[in-house]
């Protein structure tokens, strides 16, 4: 198994600095995911690691080999022993499933007996044994994604690069393939580097997440650390829908204008701040109870196991999720929004990008 190290990587497109001095390490034998919105530089970095893009500056090390340094590619693409799964399936429609999976092995000149063995092993790994003679048009979207994975791992790459691998699947298949990706990684031990804009996907499959914005890494860490301890407001906001309220210091406490003070025990800043919390981290009580912020239910949505409420507090609208089996609130009803101090994330206004 080999890891990857990226050092001060820069990639410019004309005057645009798409990747701006990024450094990180991908440990061997796990899944590292670059998470961020479109245009943040994550796919550009992946393509630079693959050798499909030539970076402007910096260094890329795969295992103990420097494959790129100082603006020059030191190791060509075909010698990096990488596999890549693109967002589009890129399956040849006129070839059988076995022929699609065997393609990379044939290009590498592997013996026929070895190709047959490896194709069988790869299809078994992705649970498609018996599909060898089928054509791509006879498969579902999830099955085609498995074929792409089988093709990428058939020639035993040491690093597998995944570019938005589940973006074309519907919600049910995405959840199923997340489990499959993690199972395959654990069974093969292959080092995987993925890019995605889907925070649920990143949290589900990753051992390490790099949250990116505008060519920079905002935070890196385990999924648990990224979720529980966002270092900047931008990370907290990107990891799922959040409520975001401005607060001002007043009499030793932070106060949300037109709503009320933050509960005792919340961090106290002496500068304007942003208060962020997730819809699941606060609760609703009948008006006047719990010492919370006064509000009015503006809208309710039944979402199965929980009900999502849109609550107006002063000039602000909050999204709050409550269990459907609990106390129900009606539109127009006065409520109290109760937040525990540990549920609130407080950031100085100037650092809340």
Image: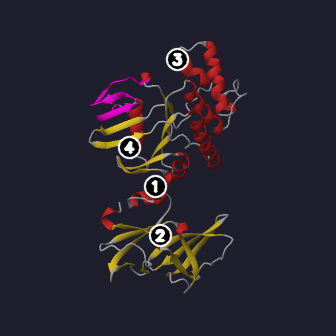
Place of residue 52 in the rendered image (x, y in percent of width and height, measured from the top left)? 40, 30
- The crowd level at tag 1 (other Cα within 10 Å; few <14, some 14-19, many 20+) is many
Seen in the image, is 91 located left or right of residue 276? Answer: right
Residue at 56% x, 85% y: name it. Answer: 289
Residue identifier under label 1: 226
Q: Secondary structure at mark 4?
A: loop
Q: Are marks 1 and 3 in contact (CB under 8 Å)?
A: no
**Start and end of the magenta stretch?**
54-77
Q: Earlier in the sequence, mark 1 or mark 3?
A: 3
Q: Secondary structure at mark 3?
A: helix
Q: Earlier in the sequence, mark 4 or mark 1?
A: 4
Residue identifier under label 2: 342
Residue identifier under label 4: 41
Residue at 48% x, 78% y: name it. Answer: 313
Snapshot quadrant of residue 50: top left
The answer for how far apart the CA atoms under marks 2 and 4 are is: 33 Å
Residue 56 in view, yes or no: no
The answer for how far apart the CA atoms under marks 4 and 1 are is: 19 Å
Snapshot quadrant of residue 135: top right
Residue at 58% x, 29% y: name it. Answer: 91
Seen in the image, is 11 located left or right of residue 156? Answer: left
Place of residue 228 in the rendered image (x, y in percent of width and height, measured from the top left)? 48, 60
Residue identifier under label 3: 107
**Disc nearest the viewer among 1 and 3:** 1
**Disc nearest the viewer among 2 and 4:** 2
The answer for how far apart the CA atoms under marks 3 and 4 are is: 31 Å
């Amino acid at each position: 198994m080999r890891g990857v190290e990226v050092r001060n990587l820069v990639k410019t497109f004309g005057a645009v600095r798409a990747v701006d001095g990024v450094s990180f390490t991908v440990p061997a034998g796990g899944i590292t995911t670059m998470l961020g919105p479109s245009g943040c530089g994550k796919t550009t970095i992946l393509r630079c690691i693959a050798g499909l893009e030539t970076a402007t500056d910096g260094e890329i090390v795969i295992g103990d080999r420097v494959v790129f340094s100082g603006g020059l590619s030191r190791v060509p693409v075909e010698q990096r022993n990488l596999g890549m799964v693109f967002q589009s399936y890129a399956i040849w429609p006129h070839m059988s499933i076995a022929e699609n999976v065997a393609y990379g092995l044939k290009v590498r000149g592997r013996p026929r007996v070895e190709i047959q063995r490896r194709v069988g092993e790869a299809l078994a790994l992705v649970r498609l044994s018996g599909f060898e003679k089928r054509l791509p048009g006879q498969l579902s979207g999830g099955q085609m994604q498995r074929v792409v994975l089988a093709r990428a791992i058939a020639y035993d790459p040491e690093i597998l690069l995944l570019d938005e691998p589940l973006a074309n699947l519907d919600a049910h298949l995405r959840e199923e393939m997340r489990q499959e990706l993690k199972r395959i990684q654990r069974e093969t031990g292959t080092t995987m580097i993925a890019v995605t804009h889907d925070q649920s996907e990143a949290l589900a499959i990753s051992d390490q997440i790099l949250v990116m914005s505008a060519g920079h890494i905002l935070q890196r860490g385990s999924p648990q650390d990224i979720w529980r301890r966002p270092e900047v407001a931008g990370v907290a906001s990107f990891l799922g829908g959040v409520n975001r309220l401005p607060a001002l210091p007043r009499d030793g406490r932070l106060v949300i204008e037109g709503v009320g003070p933050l509960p005792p025990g919340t961090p106290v800043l002496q500068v304007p701040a942003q208060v962020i919390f997730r819809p699941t981290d606060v609760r609703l009580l009948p008006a006047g109870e719990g010492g919370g912020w006064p509000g009015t239910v503006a809208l309710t949505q039944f979402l199965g196991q929980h009900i999502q409420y849109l609550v107006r507090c002063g000039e602000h609208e909050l999204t709050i999720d409550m269990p459907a089996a609990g106390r129900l609130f009606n539109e127009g009803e006065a409520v109290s929004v109760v937040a525990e101090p540990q549920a609130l994330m407080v950031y100085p206004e100037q650092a809340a990008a």
